Image (cartoon, rainbow, N blue to C red):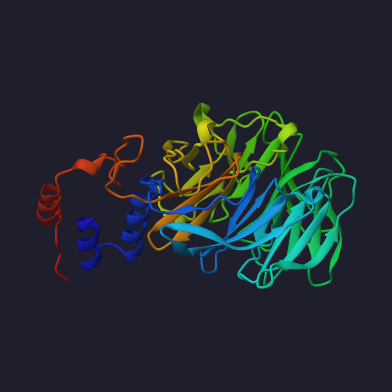
Amino acid sequence: MLRFLLTREVAQDPPSTLRRAQNTRATYSLSPSPSFSLKTRHYGAVNALAVEKVENRYLLSAGADAIINLWDLEASSGGVVDTLSTASLPTTATPSSVKWWTGDTGMFSTTHHDHSLLIWDTNTFSTAARFPLGPEAPIRTHAPSAHGGVNPVIAVALGSPGVRLVDLRTSSAAHTLTSPYSRSGTLDVAWSPRSPHHIASTHDDGSLRLWDIRRASPLLHTTRAHSSGATGVEWTSDGGQVVTAGWDGKMRVWDVEQGRDCVVNFGPWITNVREDAKGILTRSPICLPSWAGGRGGEGGMLVWPGAAGGQVLLFETMTGRLIRRLRPRRRGGGGGGGGRGRVVGIAVREGVGGVEVYGGNETGGIEVWGPSLGMEDDEGEVHENVSGSGGGRANVLDEVYEDATTIPITMR
């Protein structure tokens, strides 16, 4: 780390190099938080989590018990965070997804198994608007526009063909993106971070589709992404690639501009099977922001939930290399968590010191993983440093001496 400080001070590297190196080091060291937990407030699987991106402070959780909780992650008592607000819904209205509105902590949205989309006021923690989207198919998930100030539209993934668009300016939900070439249901949807008009969606026939909502014929491109249902889609932070996951146990990276498979092999670690009985249908990776680091070149890293034993997996996006297994904290009494059920909902909190990962599991608990530089985790792993030398036990004085004597200094 001294090398990065020195090269920054002598203007050999921009400040972003040091930031990326530190964030890479922090992300590679993610482990169960030893002094921070969320008090259990769900009595069924935590289906969805969301952290707002304005203050990176508030977390929403939605469970199969038809309860929605709001958490203030900076208001802990003895390292345990309690709920800030709670809303209970009828059991027929179990939430299937929860999302913050882009750039505004005062509003969020949820979809429900009673075929409705709800808009919420965070301050009163009550519904401000309800959009019934018809009884013909269940709602899988939804995505508010990534450019909410320019395009205040929510895309909804219905079990029926097409993507339903809800325009908050006109309170209209009549526009549906459809293709005459397929009648397959939609499982996931995501807005491009580059353009306010482009959407990616995945479908139960295994296809990936790109849409332009301005066009009379909105379908831009379609490809067979998976041999069976494609359950999730996520854009990389620069908008250059999309990552898809499917019931075939595969995860793939696609180049958007060239329309081709990047041929990234994530190995045998992706377990993603159809489970209609539990309602766990939409499972999508989360792509970490580019500043979070990564040693696999451009593309950064991604987080995959749903591994056995309550584990969450961290991969390099463009190489497919498994970086780390995030294991649940061992239960010794006290605190939150709630067992070792498989993680079904996941969210990432971005901060100055790196990222934190939150995972909601099948038993109603919420796991927390945070950076722990230079420490060993509860499984005895030594966290590796950015050079990949496994340096948690390196001699610090040797490192200081090497940095001070091997870096050339050019006077300008």
Residue nearest the observer in this picture, 124 or 163: 124
Residue nearest the observer in this picture, 105 or 408: 105
Residue nearest the observer in this picture, 30 or 20: 30
- Place of residue 375 in the rendered image (x, y in percent of width and height, measured from the top left): 28, 45
Q: Is residue 113 visible?
A: no
Q: Quadrant of the N terminus?
A: bottom left
* Label tally: 0
Direction from residue 107 to residue 358 in the image, left or right: left
Q: Is residue 378 above or below residue 194?
A: above
Name the residue at the top extreme: 268
Question: Who's the residue at 41% across and 40% down the image?
Answer: 332
- Place of residue 205 in the rendered image (x, y in percent of width and height, measured from the top left): 76, 34
Name the residue at the front extreme: 333
The picture quadrant where one finds residue 412 is bottom left
The picture quadrant where one finds residue 196 is bottom right
- Place of residue 89 in the rendered image (x, y in percent of width and height, measured from the top left): 76, 55
Question: Who's the residue at 47% across and 36% down the image?
Answer: 320
Q: Is residue 295 visible?
A: yes
Direction from residue 354 to residue 363 in the image, left or right: right
Question: Who's the residue at 62% across and 32% down the image?
Answer: 272
Direction from residue 3 to residue 156 in the image, left or right: right
Question: Who's the residue at 58% across and 55% down the image?
Answer: 239
Q: Is residue 126 above or below residue 380?
A: below
- Place of residue 222 in the rendered image (x, y in percent of width and height, measured from the top left): 73, 42
Residue nearest the observer in this picture, 49 or 80: 80
